[in-house]
Structures are given as C-alpha cells and as structure tokens.
Amino acid sequence: MMGARADRPFDIVVYGATGFTGRLVAQYLARAYGQEGPRWAMAGRSASKLAEVRDAIDAPINTPLIVADAGDPASLTAMAEQTRVVVTTVGPYQLYGEPVLAACIAAGTDYADLCGEPVWMRQMVDKYDAEAKSTGARVSFSSGFDSIPFDLGVLMLQKEAVARFGAPSPRVKGRVRGMKGGASGGTAASLKATLATLGQHPELIPWMTSAFGLTPGFEGPPQPAGDKPQYDETLGSWEAPFIMATINTKNVHRTNRLLGHPYGQDFVYDEMILTGPGDQGKAVAEHIATTPMIGRPDDPQPGEGPSQEERENGFYDVLFVGEMPDGRTIRYGVKGRYDPGYGSTSRMLAETGIALLSCAAEGGIATPGALLGEALVARLRAHAEIAFAVED
C-alpha cells in the first residue's frame, strides 16, 4: 500500500480550502513551501471559489484545484485516490466528516483533521478503526490546538520524567498560563452540533463526560473533575475550568493507551486555567467558570473568525507539571506564537500532514502523539514557531 500511495500525483490535499481555516492552511503551505516542498492541491465544492482563494493567498497559479463535495461520495473517492494525505477542515465533522474519512480509509490514504468532537470521534473509532488497520490508512484526529500542544506536551514531559527519575509521572497537571485568540463560527457550530447530538442520543453522554471516552476497552482511575474554581497550593494560584479539557484529556489518555500505557495504567491528568493568587485570582477564576466562551447568541457564523492582526498578535503558554510519588516534580512548557485556534492551528494541521508523509506507523485511527510523537515536535519547533522545553 505504501508503494501504491507513493505513486499518487499529490502528497497532500487540503480539503475545505475555501473555508476560514482551510484557507489559512493552504496559505501556510504556499508561503512556507511553495513549489519546493510537498506536492499539494486545494479541494472544495466550487472550482471558481478555489481559484479565487488560490489567487488571494498568492499560491502559484498552477496550484491544482480539485472539486470535491461531502454530498458526492464519488468525488471524495476520486480525491482520496489521488493523494497520500488529506487534511480536512470541513466541520462540524459529525455533520460532514464521515464521508471524507470513509473515502480516505477505503483508499488507504492518510487523514488529519481538527476535530474536537469526542462523541463523533468515538463513533468513528468503533466503526472504522479495523478497516483503517487493514488498508494502512493512518488517521490523526485533533491535529490542531485541540489537542496537539497538550497531547505532545504530556508526551515530552513523560520522556523527561523517565530520563530524570527513571519512571513516568503518574500525575500530570496541564495548566494554561496565558492565551490570546478568538473563536470562529466553525468552533461554535461544532459545539452546537455536539449538544444537539447528545440531546437526541443521551446514551452517548458517558463518552462525552468520561476522560476515557476514547479508550474503548480501558477505564483508568478516577480523574479530577476540573469543573469549578479551585486553589492549587503547589502552584500558588487559583485555577478555572478549561473548556477544551473535555477533548484534550481524552486524547492524552488515548495516546497513552495506543502506545501501550507508557505513562502507566494508573495515570491521572487534568487541565485548568491558572488565574493567579489572592482575591483577584479567585475573582478571575469565578468569572471564567460562569462566563461561556462559545455557545452564545453573538457567536460568529461559519466562515468568520479572527482578523489577521488578531491572529498574529495571539499566543498561548501551557505549563505541564509532573508529580512523582516521592514528591519530586518536573515542569515542561509549550508556547506558541499566533492565536491558538487559527494562526497556530493552521500550521499544526499542515505540519501534521507533512509529517504523515514520512510516518512509519501502521494504519489505524490514532492521535498525533501516538502516530507522530517526537517527529511532529521537531517539525513544529522548526517550522510552526512552537516551543517545547523543560522548565527548571
């Protein structure tokens, strides 16, 4: 299968290139790699809109354009069979993602997306994982801000813990120290679609609420709820719930499971936002806990998102703290330039696609950490302006 894929005309196809985030992915590939890097193409429903975006992002005039539509399975099959990797930004994935995923898996084509919809992801794992293993297709869900900085941050912290202490940390805290960036209409639409699905199918709620919703067949120890403000004595700071913890924690546990539990089967992990000490820190934590970030009447519409200035002025700074049974600790930081959800996410998805081209892992539905691990860390350090480092 690898030999057959190597003969395909394209290395990477960006599906959804006319959407807000897809356009950013295509723009990044055009600017960072031009015609010197992977052979890539833009795909979407409209040839004329694809041409408009190609010209607007200053991509080469001969950049291939592929018409493909989630409502036309034959077009998706044709797209998947032309390329080694499809990176897709067309969400909500629970509404539009399965036909693309199915086409890629059937064709033995690697696939990466930005999915932060854990119920849909679990459904796809149950339905398609065996077929992906059979065809050799490597599937990397959540290949953006959810959940690469967290998935890879824990992976790298545990590598350092083993080197320093001779064993992984059984307890790791993921703590957002700072973050600046806006949400897009696509993010809001995904949340609304998830809530609608759970309303129609309440039997799926346990997959959403359990930290082990993406580890079928394995249930680890109880995990911190992280659903209310609290004070962390060891960090000297108040903490607030983090909206993305619902998806990130599941991916971290899935990576641990897929790699054979290198973090241990008793691994405990949670994520929160650090808001500072004292009464002010407490007040900020309580404000965050009671103020929805998305799901409001003024949410942006699909196709809308942060401006270029907002994307370029954005950033994120995440601290991981590993605690050993004897009280020793290790700290690891992941810091990214650009706003997390779009400026940085577009780079992460593109680099995931490129990393898959040289990936030696077997087929299956996995995570960036399990499939690509340190190879992706190296690419993100070198090309995406994301820093991974031990903090003493």
Image (cartoon, grey):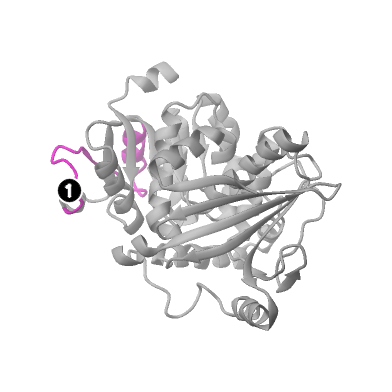
Q: Residue at x 31, y 31 (%)?
A: 38
Pinpoint residue 200: horizontal percent, then vertical percent: 60, 65
Mark 1: few, some, or many residues within 10 Å (few <14, many ≥20)?
few
User: Which of the 4 image quadrants contains residue 162?
Assistant: top right
Q: Residue at x 45, y 28 (%)?
A: 108
Pinpoint residue 152: horizontal percent, then vertical percent: 58, 43
Instruction: Residue under label 1, please give it.
Output: 58
Amino acid on which the number 1 mark rests in the picture: Asp
Left or right: where 309 falls relative to 246: left
Q: Is residue 283 magenta?
A: no
Q: Which residues are magenta?
A: 56-80
User: With respect to residue 185, does 15 lie above or below?
Assistant: above
Residue sitting at the far top: 3
Residue sitting at the far left: 61
Q: Quadrant of the N terminus?
A: top left
Left or right: where 38 falls relative to 125: left
Pinpoint residue 262: horizontal percent, then vertical percent: 72, 35
User: Which of the 4 image quadrants contains residue 361?
Assistant: top right
Residue 109 visible within the image: no
Residue 222 visible within the image: yes
Q: Nearer the viewer, residue 40 or 124?
A: 40
